[in-house]
Image: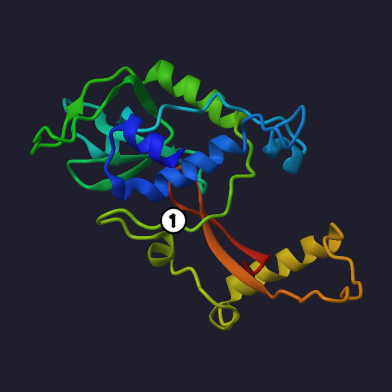
Amino acid sequence: MVRSLIVKGKVLKKFWPEVVLWSIHVLNRSPTFFVQNMTPEEAWSGRKATTDHFKVFGCIAYAHIPDVKRKKLDENGEKCIFLRVNEHSKAYKLFNPITKKVVTSRDVVFDEAKMRDWNRKVKEQQLIPIDFEDAENRTEQQMQSLDEHLPISSTIPLENEQPPENQHSDPISFEEAVKDTKWQMAMEAEINSIEKNHTWELTDLPKGHKTIGVKWVFKTKLNEKGEIGKHKAHLVAKG
């Protein structure tokens, strides 16, 4: 599926991490032989999976440029390509091939019939006038229906893109996190949730089996404006 999307989307192979994440997102919300009469996402979360937000990978996408970032007569649309849904803010994750920057926006107009011609040399950023009013309403409806159980994943950064843990100083170990009050509170909330939901049941280890360890995963969650919303700590099984 990853190979097919790269070819169909006419994108560079360096985007393979984004293609993998988008493939997983789509497959979890698609029918499967192993889970009858429901999608894997519904089987996991207990809620109907939505697909209204699905877009053609690699298609042309115009991200709205906020008023504060442009002059009155400047164009309001930034020409990018679609990568996937951002797991932190339920917004679309796009890539501007001219500035080499990743753009996260909920206010996007898609042209799913067109792909970027990577062989064409374009030196200047393309800003285009777009009517975002109708698109904003459609996107808001799609994102409201998008379930919040997006996968926790580590993404290999694209060129010139700083990974989230570098941008927001996410700790990579318990020893580092325990020194910070906000991460202490996040871990305490996770433990309380585990106990409340009876996630674990203490039992004897069956013969011939080995135990596996656990580790903490720390993520800074962003809101729709790209600002820090909250800090989350997840206790997960290794591997």
> Of residues 230 and 117, which is closer to you in this image?
117
> x, y (%) of residue 135?
42, 20
Residue drawn 44% across the image and 69% down it:
169
Q: Residues within 10 Å of mark 1 (few under 14, many from 20)?
A: few
Residue drawn 36% across the image and 21% down it:
112
Can residue 28 be seen by looking at this rendering?
Answer: yes
For residue 35, side relative to residue 122 (left or right): right
> x, y (%) of residue 51?
57, 26
Can residue 66 be seen by looking at this rendering?
Answer: no
Provide the secondary structure element on which disc 1 rests: loop
Q: Which residue has dot 1 on it?
A: 155
> Of residues 232 and 113, which is closer to you in this image?
113
| 80 lies above or below 158 | above
**Badge 1 amino acid:** Thr
Residue that protrudes farthest toward the right in the picture: 203
Residue drawn 50% across the image and 40% down it:
23
For residue 8, side relative to residue 210 (left or right): left
Dividing the picture into quadrants, the one containing residue 131 is: top left
Residue that protrudes farthest toward the front in the picture: 208
| 221 lies above or below 92 | below
For residue 114, side relative to residue 88 (left or right): left
